Image (spheres, rainbow, N blue to C red):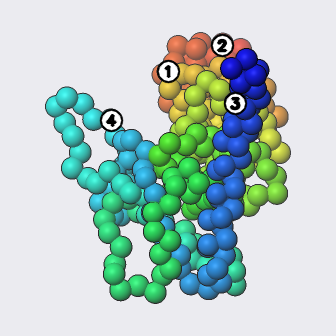
Amino acid sequence: MKGETRGTPALVAVLGMLGLLAAPVRAQSLDARVQAVRDGRVRMSFAARPGVCGNGRNITAYRSNRDWESDCEHGPVRVVLTRRDGKVVDVDTYVGGHWRAASDARDLGTVSAPVAAHYLVSLRVEGAVFPATLADSVVIWPQLLSLAKDGSAPHAVRKQAVFWLGQAAGEAATKDLATLADSSDRDVQKAAVFALSQLHDGAGVPDLIRIARTHPDPAVRRRAMFWLGQSHDPRALALFEEILEAKGER
């Protein structure tokens, strides 16, 4: 028993490392299954996170309460990947509904939601980030942040990553959104400013004020000022008063 006690921390550490590696490894396995189709369509299904529902085409997120419940279907998320010359060129996403029986698509069936989410983000293809954010039982924002910061990723994909990062951002991601607002890509900067404006309880207001005051790009400063104006936050009103007083606009 004494020896088992000494070995327990090491065993726990090993199991923890295996847990961290499991999703990427399974994502590689999913990638191999998709890669088997060089040209054509591949479809898969996975569990949707709580609050996500749809009717096969329209997708929404909501919070139920004691008096009301949506009658749309709570998943699964259904994704169709169109492949051409061995590459994913298009992604279609649905929630609920059912697949048509007569189809030439390769159906991978139901796959792990976390594995699907990590795989979709890794594609770095426009339209693949959105379904990843719908997946159940996965914290996706660290991977979105990595994608948003990756200057080699396609421009449109980085913008999408920033947008969904803002939707998912809690306190842990706020600082990184502010950093993205200072990146070298103007559209990514603007997307980060918008993401900051969407944070709950005015969490992004201090960074928006900093950007409005000091950002070297006038277009980004104006975008920050615009979203501050939409916030109706007293701190934003104080900034406007200060600027107008400095210009003698009283």
Q: Of the two numbered discs 2 and 3 on the same chain, state the one appearing first in sequence.
A: 3
Nearest to the observer: residue 40 or residue 6: 6
**Image location (x, y in percent) of residue 229:** 54, 28
Mark nearer the viewer, 1 or 2: 1
Q: Earlier in the sequence, mark 3 or mark 4?
A: 3
Of discs 4 and 2, which sits in the foreground? Answer: 4
Quadrant in which residue 141 is drawn: top right
Residue at 31% across, 65% down: 97
Residue placed under numbered mark 2 in the picture: 242
Side of 4 where 99 appears, left or right: left
Residue 101 at x, y = what percent? 33, 81
Residue 80, position in %: x, y? 50, 71
Give the residue displayed 38% in from the left and 57% down from the top: 76
Three-letter amino acid code at disc 3?
A: Val
Asked which secondary structure carries label 3, the reply is helix
Tag shown at residue 201: 1
Label 1 environment density (alpha carbons within 10 Å; few <14, some 14–19, many ≥20): few
Residue linked to disc 4 = 63
**Which mark identifies residue 156?**
none
Vertical relation: 151 (above or below) 125: above
Residue at the location (66% across, 76% down)?
A: 35
Name the amino acid type tagged 2: Glu
Q: How much space separates mark 4 and mark 2, taking CA atoms?
A: 39 Å
Residue to which mark 3 is pinned: 12
What is the spatial separation of the Cα atoms under label 2 and label 3, in whole angstroms?
Answer: 56 Å
- Mark 3 or 4: in front is 3
Which is closer to the viewer, label 4 or label 1? Answer: 4
Q: CA distance from mark 4 to mark 1?
A: 18 Å
**Which image quarter is the C terminus in?**
top right
State whether residue 140 is above or below residue 245: below
> What kind of element bears circle 2?
helix
Callout 1 touching callout 2 (CB < 8 Å): no
